[in-house]
Amino acid sequence: MDTAISVEHLSYTYPGVDDTPGVAVFLDLNLTVEAGSFVAVLGSNGCGKSTLAKHFNSILLPCGGKVYVSGMDTSDPDQLIAIRRAVGMVFQNPDNQIVANVVEEDVAFGPENLGIAAPAIRQRVDNALKQVDMYHYRNHAPHLLSGGQKQRVAIAGVIAMEPKCIVLDEPTAMLDPKGRREVMETILRLNREKGITVVLITHHMNEAAQADRVVVLHKGDVALDGTPQSVFSQVEKLHQMGLASVETVELCHSLKKHGFDLPLDRLNTEDCAQALYEVLKA
């Protein structure tokens, strides 16, 4: 499978203010993201999740090492436009990304800035809104939408630029459960039906459990990397890093301490309930 993003020996230090020393986030980070995959990135506050995400779109540039997007060096200024076309960014607060007073005008903003011809923009906007199930709201004012709907409009604005990869930095952090569910359904559909590479930065374990792969950052390095089942079954390691596992795994882990022989790879309520049933009937 092709590589969408390659991080090679990345180091990054936020510069200090006045005479204060800088803050090192990464010293020697290595990571690859395969094209078409859905990767969730977890970690406690300050571990570098958002810093890493911003390297994927050349918002931040490495202090050392390299980051490549589809083979393009993110520190090469001549590749900047191509990199930002290839990797779209969605941030935590959708209000910070909405720039127009009408939904379809907001979604058209990105393609217009790329110099796309008007007829093609119309098609891109319609297609993007349909992909996030917001086409019927195309003439609405964004400020009248719910949080989840606003975030889907922000995602549509990125889709309209036709990126190969979408990086979402805590996109559901400010949403209620309904809004989180709407956004996650949209992300999964884009990945599984459209083949768009997705990198999701999140602190919601149930969201990460829906990815193909989970990467856990700790103290500026990759501490865990694997399928959701393999990562979330390592409950003690997650606890040591100040993280929890998925709720169903936490339940099985607690019961296991009390003598119940339960697996630690049941990531949804149905599978967890079945495991409990099988233990209790034995």
Image (cartoon, rainbow, N blue to C red):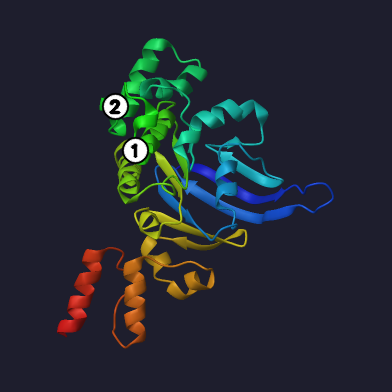
Q: Nearer the viewer, residue 266 or 36?
A: 266
- Residue at horizontal 28 percent and vertical 85 percent from the top: 260
Indicate the quadrant containing the N terminus: top left, top right, bottom left or bottom right: top left
Image coords of residue 32 (percent x, y): 52, 49
Q: Which amino acid, by three-letter code, is at mark 2?
A: Tyr
Q: Position of residue 164 (x, y in %)?
A: 44, 34
Dot 1 and dot 2 residues touching (CB under 8 Å): no
Q: Which tag is nearer the camera, tag 1 or tag 2?
A: 1
**Camera-nearest residue between 158 and 86:** 158
**Circle nearer the N terminus (1, 2):** 2
The quadrant of the image that shows the C terminus is bottom left
Q: Categorize mark 1 by other alpha carbons within 10 Å: few (<14), some (14-19), many (20+).
A: some
The residue that disc 1 covers is 146
Q: Quadrant of residue 124?
A: top left
Q: What is the residue that sits farthest to the right in this orientation?
A: 19
Residue at mark 1 to residue at mark 2: CA–CA distance: 12 Å
Name the residue at the left extreme. Answer: 281
Q: Residue furthest top?
A: 118
Please, is residue 78 above or below residue 236 in the view? Answer: above
Quick check: 170 above or below 244? above
Label drawn at residue 137: 2
Q: Residues within 10 Å of mark 2 (few under 14, many from 20)?
A: some
| Residue 87 can be seen in this image | no
Task: Point out which mark residue 206 bears.
Answer: none
Q: SS at mark 2? A: helix
Question: Residue at image x 34%, y 46%?
Answer: 184
Residue 267 x %, y %: 31, 64
The amino acid marked with disc number 1 is Ser
